[in-house]
Amino acid sequence: MTAVPRSDNRLRLLHVIHTLDPAAGGAVSAARSMCAALAARGHDITLYATGPRREDQSGAYFTRIFPMEFPPMAVSAGFARALKDMRDVDLVHVHMLYRFPQAAAAAFCRRNAIPYCVQPHGALEPVLFHKRERRGFKRLYERLVENRNLNSAAGLIYTAKGEADAVRFLNLRPAAFVIPLGLDLAQFDCGATGFRDRHGLAGMELVVWVGWLVPVKGLDILITAFAALARQRPHARLVLVGPDPEGYGTALLGTKAAEAVGVDIDAGSIRHAQSTYGSATIRFVEGSCTELPLPDASFDVVVSFETIEHLDAADQQPMLAEFARVLKPAGLLIISSPNKRRYSDARDYINEFHRHELYRDGLAELLAKAFPAQRWFHQDVAPWSSIWSEDEGDRVEAWLGDAGRVSSYVPPEGMYFIVVAARTSAAFSAMRQQP
């Protein structure tokens, strides 16, 4: 892949992406960061994108946003017309796939003999390439448009060797370049200690992973590797930062249950979860946890992990009442909640996304109205991660020590509560007897 510099060694480069909405993921941040870094090196950089309205943004580099006539594919006549202003660019960098701006830019480059590179940003990874969501449409689009765009490129850019290796099954012709994404440390206060202090991690060595908490990211590999590291470095802590947008937890339950139903108030999340994990035994429905779109007495178990603290106090009891309504008479509720005394009070910490946190007595009182039978557990993370029962401690012995002394260990009050609750204690025995 070759771009011929001008006499002053400055390149004129066009970057193309179909959206600048941060919610679209890391590709948006990567494109903007690349443009800023290249502009800082003295190159002439323009970024073309589409959006809800026309907008020009000046700065270290020039950004043009064109309104869309058909948002699902980011179709924009203004974008296509504006490409003619870029006939003298040295190289076009196309970010992401499967949208009109990328296809229009690639076709423009072929017509005008301009070299272009394509950076898929993970879109060709086998897990994503073969997923059920819009599979038929994507295969047709590839045959008609995308395959030519990829194979006519001067080069394909991948952010890691693993990504480049994973797409070899496609037998793409262009040369592959592995270029890791950069990080501008000037944007961060590297000496800040707020995060460590808020989360009780002062003095710890942190391994931080940032990204979506989804299977394709290989977190199982990371966690296994970190376990080996932690045995050698007892002060190391693994921090996972990111959302779980896919309904992965419901899918895991569905591998053992006769039926698993996930509920979320966001329609987009439901569509994505259904297309990703939906099956004969796993489904997702849109609805509020205070008005579940489910029939009475239809479930054996309701699982609600760290939901209650995100509701206002006035909505917490109605949510529990809905759980009781959809559970069968002998059904179980498995619910978790942060322990306000340790999570917030002891650390002088405020989580802006929590609407109403609970102490143990407050959670017990709320549960008692519909679920008087309760089994309490505590969860915490130290050099180990553990869940222990309040009333069955004689089943497990814990010891703590070093080369000079070993003594019995009494676990502290947990950072989180996990409660298994039911209408009567007989439900616990009945559940144990099920295969």
Image (cartoon, rainbow, N blue to C red):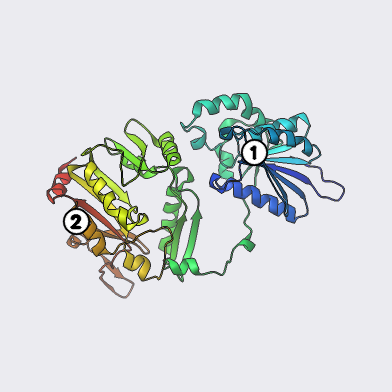
Q: Nearer the viewer, residue 319 or 153?
A: 319
Q: Pointer 2: residues within 10 angstroms few (<14), some, or many (20+)?
A: some
Q: Amino acid at mark 2?
A: Ala
Q: Which residue is mark 1?
A: 67
Residue 349 visible here = yes
Q: Is residue 111 above or below residue 161?
A: above
C-alpha distance separating marks 2 and 1: 54 Å
Q: Secondary structure at mark 2?
A: helix
Sequence-wise, the earlier of marks 2 and 1 is: 1
Q: Percent position (x, y) of residue 18?
A: 62, 39
The N terminus: image quadrant: top right
Q: Residue furthest bottom?
A: 404
Q: Percent position (x, y) of residue 209?
A: 49, 55
Q: Percent position (x, y) of residue 383?
A: 38, 64
Mark 2 or 1, which is nearer the eye?
Answer: 1
The C terminus: image quadrant: top left
Q: Nearer the viewer, residue 330 or 314?
A: 314
The number of numbered badges drawn on the structure is 2
Q: Nearer the viewer, residue 198 or 285?
A: 285
Residue 255 visible here = no
Q: Going by the image, does 53 lie left or right of 110?
A: left
Q: Going by the image, does 431 lie left or right of 185?
A: left
Q: Amino acid at mark 1?
A: Pro
Q: Percent position (x, y) of residue 175?
A: 68, 37
At horizontal 76% and vertical 29% (from top left) the residue drawn is 111
Q: Which residue is mark 2?
A: 368
At horizontal 48% and vertical 46% (from top left) the residue drawn is 217
